[in-house]
Image: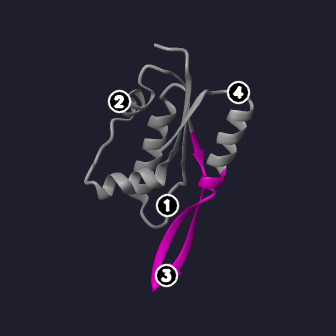
Amino acid sequence: MNNQRVAIFIDGSNLYYSLKDLGVEKLNFRKFLQELSKDKLLITIYYYNAPLDISINQKRYWEQQKFFDFLRKIPDFKVVLCRMRKHKKDGKVIFDVKGDDVHLAVDLVSGAYENLYDTAIIV
């Protein structure tokens, strides 16, 4: 292992929909993180997402909460919860994650300024 420190920043919503578009149903997060960091020293992982609306689908809400709890058990893994915005578009109710990009950018820049990592990987 080399001494290069790595921080990983994951946009959870974008990752989810990208994997869904590729037909990937499950991602082994531990293996995924190992592959991203390779032989470098993994310092921290940030995962940005918003909780689903429990009033829309309780089952999916609790599945997501269970997933967040699983992620929190991974060493140095930080789940950053943002907010979910609900609006109508073409007569349909649409949900958007809001604030994730801002949180990611702030954590990325502050970590660089504080010299917390040598390499940042944005997923």
Asked where in the image residue 86 lies, by quadrant, the reply is: bottom right
Q: CA distance from mark 4 to mark 1?
A: 39 Å
Q: Secondary structure at mark 3?
A: strand
Q: Which residue is mark 3?
A: 89
Q: Earlier in the sequence, mark 1 or mark 3?
A: 1
The circle on residue 54 is 1
Residue 28, image x, y percentages: 33, 35
Q: Amino acid at mark 1?
A: Ile
Within 10 Å of disc 4 (Cα), the crowding (few <14, some 14-19, many 20+) is few
The circle on residue 31 is 2
Q: CA distance from mark 2 to mark 4?
A: 26 Å
- Relative height, residue 34 to residue 58 (above, below): above
Q: Secondary structure at mark 1?
A: loop
Q: CA distance from mark 1 to mark 3?
A: 21 Å
Q: Is residue 77 visible to the viewer in this orientation of the structure?
A: no
- Relative height, residue 84 to residue 28 (above, below): below
Q: Earlier in the sequence, mark 4 or mark 3?
A: 3
Q: Earlier in the sequence, mark 2 or mark 3?
A: 2
Mark 4 or 1, which is nearer the eye? 4
Q: CA distance from mark 4 to mark 3?
A: 43 Å
Q: Amino acid at mark 2?
A: Lys
Residue positioned 47% across, 77% down in the render: 93
Mark 4 or 3, which is nearer the eye? 4
CB within 8 Å, label 2 to label 1? no
Write down the region rendered in magenta.
Answer: 79-102
Q: Amino acid at mark 3?
A: Lys
Q: Earlier in the sequence, mark 2 or mark 1?
A: 2
Q: Earlier in the sequence, mark 2 or mark 4?
A: 2
Residue 24, image x, y percentages: 27, 49
Q: Nearer the viewer, residue 51 or 8?
A: 8
Q: Nearer the viewer, residue 121 or 52?
A: 121
